[in-house]
Amino acid sequence: MASEATELTVPGPNGDRVMRVSSPSRVLWPEAGITKLDLANYIVEVGDAFVAANGDRPLSLQRFPAGVDGEQFFSKNPPKGAPDFIRSVPVVYPSARTHPQLVIDEPAAAVWAVQMNTVVFHPWPSRAENTDNPDQLRIDLDPQPGTDFDDAIPVAIELRAVLAEAGLTAFVKTSGNRGLHVFAPLEATKEFQVVRHAVIAAAREVERRMPKTVTTAWWKEERGSRIFLDFNQANRDRTMAGAYSPRPLPHAPVSCPITWDELQNTDPTLHTVLTVPERLRTNGDPWAQMHADPGRIDTLLEWWERDLAAGLGELPFPPDYPKMPGEPPRVQPSRARHDP
């Protein structure tokens, strides 16, 4: 007996492609009743904006074969059987190992990823032709216990002001969960660790201005009820959900670009797989011109050097990273205090 399947016609830069979707009635989001075919149709509807945000970048796929309530895994290498119009690019991981990673150039490639049970798309902040030098500065505003999305809003506004003082233009999107993501386009001239230092400098400046609200403390026990500015998302091989990417939460939210004018009154729970296509048709893409005028991180790097001179050094790296130059001990502060 043949398996259930359907075909979608997907417009793209090289003309229409007919893409097969197997098990189209499989429910991915049980609470919202959204199926695999619904997700594929969503990608078609937001295709141009999706590719503009996530295309031409190394990409990791977060895949959910049994729906968002089931098991999940990440694909960093191109899955077997990819169509010939889908390419890959070699990237260097923190371990110094080099391996090919998927690149999406058109909506049909993203529909194929949905066919492979992808729900969340995680693009690198660098382009396929220059994977070592990010062209985006990214900061994840992560509400800690006792805070929520509304608490992140004034932090994002202050971060925008700080970046503007450093000569950068900030863009904002909902994370698809409780936080916000702030991006700034860059000239792709500095490697990851240098951009990370620029992120730390910006985060520390916001923390100085909002010490009761913001923290750069890597260890959770030191953060308190504040918004954590996650500087380690700026590391090589660290990604966040891409713009217009769905998230695996019950109401099928989307990490949705918004304008700064919208930020104070936006409700992130309303930006979902079911609502974002109409939002795009009505309002357009707030990130359409993001890379029209990329900036430089020179001023932020001056701030980094200023802070170094004042005794503020390197911050911890993720635990799977090799020991990095100047990094403080990777030991939880409460444990360190008890060590002999």
Image (cartoon, helix red, strand yellow):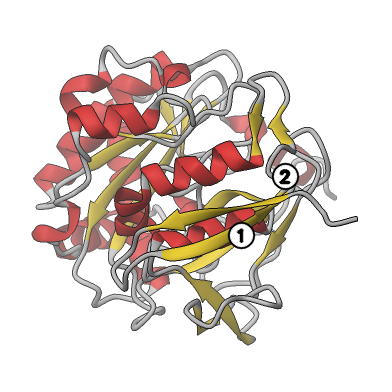
| Residue at screen point 68% across, 59% down | 116
Q: Which residue position holds label 1?
A: 20
Look at the image and tell me whether residue 292 can be seen. Answer: yes
Query: For residue 264, which quarter of the picture?
Result: top left
| Residue at screen point 85% across, 50% down | 340
Q: What residue type is labelled 2?
A: Gln
In the displayed structure, 233 sits above or below 127; it is above
Look at the image and tell me whether residue 309 can be seen. Answer: no
Q: Which residue position holds label 2?
A: 332
Q: Which of 13 and 199 is in front in this view?
A: 13
Q: What is the x, y in percent for residue 54?
A: 39, 58
Q: Which amino acid does label 1 sit on?
A: Arg
Mark 1 or mark 2, which is nearer the start of the sequence? 1
Q: What is the x, y in percent for residue 18?
A: 50, 63
| Residue at screen point 40% across, 78% down | 131
Q: Distance between the residues labelled 2 and 1?
A: 49 Å
Q: Is residue 40 left or right of residue 55?
A: right
Q: What is the x, y in percent for residue 187?
A: 19, 70
